[in-house]
Amino acid sequence: MSYGHEVVGKPIARKDARAKVLGEARYVDDLALPGMLYVKVLRSPHACARIRSVDVSRARAVEGVVAVLSAQDIPGANSIGPIIKDQAILCGDMVRYVGDAVALVAAETEQSAEQALAQLEVDYEPLPAVLDPLMALKPGAPLVQPKGNIGTHFKVYRGDVEKALQEAAVVVERRFLTPRIEHAYLEPEGALAAPDLEGGITVWSSTQYPHRDREEVSRMLGLPQSRVRVHQMTTGGGFGGKLTPHAQCYVALVAQKTRRPAKIRYHRDESFIASHKRHPYVMDIKLGADREGKLLAIKATFVADTGAYLLEGRAVITKSTTHVSGPYYIPNIKADGYAVYTNTVPCGAFRGYGVPQAAFALESLMDELAERLGLDPIELRMRNALDTTLPTATGQVLRASVPFKEMLGRARVVAQSLQPLVGQASKGKRRALGVACSTRSIGSIRTPSRSTAVVSLQRDGSVTVACGHVDIGQGSDIMMAQIAAEELAVDVERVQLVTNDTAVSPDCESTSASRVTYVSGNAVRLAAEKVRRRVLELAARQLGCALEDVKLMDGVVLHREQGLSLAELFGKHTLHNLTAVAEFIPETTPLDPETGQGSPAGTYSFYAHIALVEVDEGTGQIRVLRYATISDSGRTINPLAAAGQIQGGVVMGIGYALTEEVKVDHGVVNPSFATYLIPTSFDIPEELQVEIIEDPEPTGPFGAKGFAEGTLDPVAAAIANAVSKAVGVRIARLPMTAE
């Protein structure tokens, strides 16, 4: 319910902005405790090897070394992973990729710890490695994991695909390849841990999910979760890369064993070598349509290289497969998704979560299909666009907030405005427009998303919100404050959030999958609504009037000409505050394991992008000159935060399209920003247009739904389609380099 929308919808600056700009924000590496040890990790130089022995004697003799720990020193479970825990925290018998952790050194100084690493002696027996997912699927391939090289297989089946493809007037088919890429957050991984006097552990970390950190640390140490406390420090970017707490486990183990504080800080090359990446994909897609451009069938096989361990591979491949038809209705679908183990650096959660790969393939084929049919690319998309009557690939019909056709209409206007810039720019340079679209389910895909919030209204009218989501730079804290402030009719400055401490904030699952605004925002709104109603009930009783005749505004309950302050109201009832707890779980149904049919998300967001590119035919250089985004937010809680997320998503997508690739030859061969190229200010379009379509989602907080993550999804496809038009060759591989 709306109470005037005095706060929601306004571009309010984030509360942490000033501290970050002035260098006052506190990151993990800013922390130091008396007696603190420095931790370093010995990592495998082999892609696959058996560990015969680990000799720590010479390392322990290095001056300043306090502890050298290996797998046998872990008191609890030596395994880690968000779903399938198939990765050892410290490898005891086998290493499965170059970078696997084998031992820890803790010393009084970083220099001593690094010297001790060089003295550790590990006797390895190298074994055959498999580095390519297609090779890993072949009979007789070396096994990366004992149960086989297929980590998971997910299916989406509907209708009769073979029959529909036979009857199609036009069929387009192609293999697409996408790269492994690095998160490249500004702040590499880091953590600090300290023992307490009662045998517990406190951890300070750069993380996207403090409660998962607590769970994994407690499992490893054999402690109850109540004895482990995790604080999220200011986090310098995540994008999915800070969801699995390896660093947190390392320092917690050292702290427990030495009874001293311990800190770890990855150097950039270590982050490149050891941390998980975006899944590289091999995709074979066949798409058929009738002569009028109505899509009839899609047949797809996704092979995702999940590396040595599954991590989020199960969920990522599910996301790709369930989004195989994108924002279009395709009656006949046969899609198989495989997450395949290889002896390479693991792949896991990364902004987009499998949808950018699927969107690149589908949107490229949509353009090729339009060309074959002689149709305008936007018109082809319009003829097949989802609406409130048509099902997604999983059979879910979205009954509201599906503004995709309106967005395509706006995309058409933008494309027409850019048309005068298309064609021959100067000698040897050609310009062209590309369009691409996508949709994204909000929240978890295989299990229901959930969030809990605790809202307290104090007698002075200020508000405290405890909610376990964490802000990693995306601006969710200010949006949660705006939601609470709107519901309780207070100024946003009077709302204080407690989100980054497992001892006081409830588990709201991870900051990922664009779920925070929709899921946590709903929990905050529901809890605040309970508080507001209780205040009005007490006031109505005291004033002797009907509930509908009173309202709450700026810490005062108003009834006609009367005003009753919260201090007066709470004093009358001997209350110090009013507190309410609420949980939000979207209405979903499980996906059928045989057909992939079901309703896996409470809502979806939609995207339409237009790219104007210039290609130098002599050098192969590609420049993105103009870029326009049309995004679906339901209702925008904070336009300033939303615009920042959209712009960041586009720039990240440009890197995915044109420059970024983690190259692997057994290990990572380009582990630095000198050899791994991320976009710079020179790569940003001259004009980046941000347009948001508001079509409120009835189940969202004040009509809002998450959308920031999905801004990345269609970028590579939009650029690839433009490049294809400019050079006359279809692009089927990322990144698009001059070669």
Image (tube, helix red, strand yellow):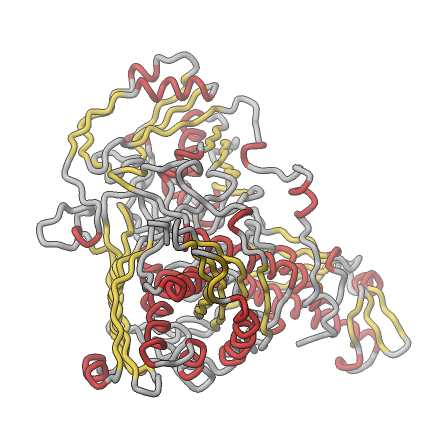
Question: Residue 271, position in %: x, y?
Answer: 41, 37
- At 48% from the left and 83% from the top, the residue drawn is 399
Quick one: 510 or 404, which is closer to the camera? 404
Q: In which quarter of the image is residue 686?
A: bottom right
Lateral position of residue 240 relative to residue 122, left or right: right
Lateral position of residue 209 relative to residue 531, left or right: left
The correct choice, above or below, for 153 with respect to 224 in the image is below
Question: Residue 606, position in %: x, y?
Answer: 49, 71
- At 83% from the left and 79% from the top, the residue drawn is 544
The correct choice, above or below, for 27 with respect to 85 in the image is above
Quick one: 13 or 489, which is closer to the camera? 13
Q: In which quarter of the image is residue 374?
A: bottom left
Question: Residue 488, position in %: x, y?
Answer: 72, 67
Lateral position of residue 488 relative to residue 270, left or right: right
- At 22% from the left and 52% from the top, the residue drawn is 133
Tell me, yes or no, if residue 497 can be seen here. Answer: yes
Question: Residue 100, position in %: x, y?
Answer: 30, 36
Residue furthest right as drawn: 561
- Count of marks, rendered view: 0
The correct choice, above or below, for 281 with respect to 445 in the image is above
Residue furthest left as drawn: 140
Lateral position of residue 357 relative to residue 408, left or right: left
The correct choice, above or below, for 455 with respect to 189 in the image is below
